[in-house]
Image: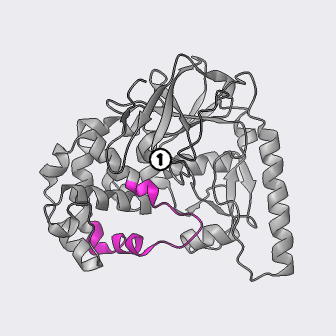
Amino acid sequence: MDTAERVLASPRGRRFAAHLGYACSTDERASNYREPLTQADALDVLAAVDAQAVARLPELDVLDALGRATDFARYWQPPDEEDLWFADPAIVTASRPIVEAVLACDHTRWWSAPMDPTCQRAVQKRYTPTDKWSETFWNNQDQDADLIAWRQHVLDDEDRFRRYLDAEPERQISGEWWSTPVPSRVRVTSRARENLGAVELLLAEDDDSDGRRARVWPVRVDDAARVYEITGPDAWIHLVDAYPLAVPASRRSDWYEATGEHLQWYLPDWAAVSADYDAVHLTVLGYLTTAGLALPLTTHTGASVLAGWEPDATFWLDPRLVRTCGAPVEWQRTGDTPWAPAPVR
């Protein structure tokens, strides 16, 4: 498969293509923040999109469409109605020129690039409009991530769900659905782009912050950091195969809902990964071609799902190798206005 096909083989990639097409459409069914109300309307709108209009979109509009794809990522429930629309072969065919056009743009060239240590940023969020900024953000910069405790948490959770299933084998029980090294003391960064303090501002999955204000901190990355790059499904499969942690009971219900498959599920054992890598970075194309898919492993009988990751996120398994360096900049947005630096008071 070529890159456009790989994007359109993924639920998040298809959703991105649709919202990108809507952003370029002149059809009243997709204008003024409206979206098509039926699958037939969605097909009509996307089939009529001018690929040259896609190529002319500013980078922030493209990232906003990508943000819509992350907004609708749900790894604990079945695909929603629109995700099912976008998987229809006719809509996939109509979406292909849209994806090809955006991938040819200069401002998407970095989507396959490795973590850039020169422009990493950390985002500090508020969770209610009345929250005060915590002054303890990343203040314990010499602590490790305590991934041994993370592994024990996962094993305890797996044991608890196994007991539930032994008692009620047919019961569907939701629990932890993500495949990130959380909860732990890992740190997360993403890159800055022109007119955007950090791409995390637009691309956060499952974000329960107030979504209106954030502090963006410059960070310094240790030159010796060893970074594993998730560039697509094969890179994720290789990581899980190399550092497997079986979680068939705790992920059974949620990943069945998300993928329609009952499989022997695995996560990467992040404690084991941290012996060989200090950080793991997910490229934007890695996200668009991997997230939400049930990916069969190569050397183990089972599968894994990339879930809870954000495009361009770097999880620092050794947080001591990334430190804040300088004052933060406060960013804000109101309603549908773009993120912008807040006025200095």
Residue located at (53% from left, 16% from top): 326
Q: What secondary structure is marked by label 1?
A: loop
Q: Is residue 84 magenta?
A: yes
Residue located at (57% from left, 55% from top): 307
Residue 109 vs residue 257, the one in the foreground? 257
Color theme of the render = one colour
Q: Crowding near pointer 1: few (<14 within 10 Å), some, many (20+)?
A: many
Quarter holding the N terminus is bottom left
Image height check: is 326 above or below 114? above
Residue located at (74% from left, 53% from top): 245
Q: Position of residue 267 (x, y in %)?
A: 68, 53
Is residue 341 visible from the viewing direction of this image? Answer: yes
Amino acid type, callout 1 = Gly
Q: Position of residue 168 (x, y in %)?
A: 81, 81
Q: Is residue 253 magenta?
A: no
Q: Position of residue 162 (x, y in %)?
A: 83, 69
Quarter location, residue 227: top right
Residue 296 vs residue 204, the one in the foreground? 204
Q: Position of residue 19 (x, y in %)?
A: 30, 59
Q: Which residues are magenta?
A: 68-92
Is residue 6 visible from the viewing direction of this image? Answer: no
Q: Is residue 181 left or right of residue 214?
A: right
Image height check: is 150 above or below 341? below
In this figure, which residue is indicated by the disc labeled 1? Answer: 211
Q: Is residue 16 left or right of residue 222?
A: left
Quarter holding the C terminus is top left
Image height check: is 158 above or below 220? below
Q: Is residue 110 left or right of residue 40?
A: right
Residue located at (16% from left, 67% from top): 28
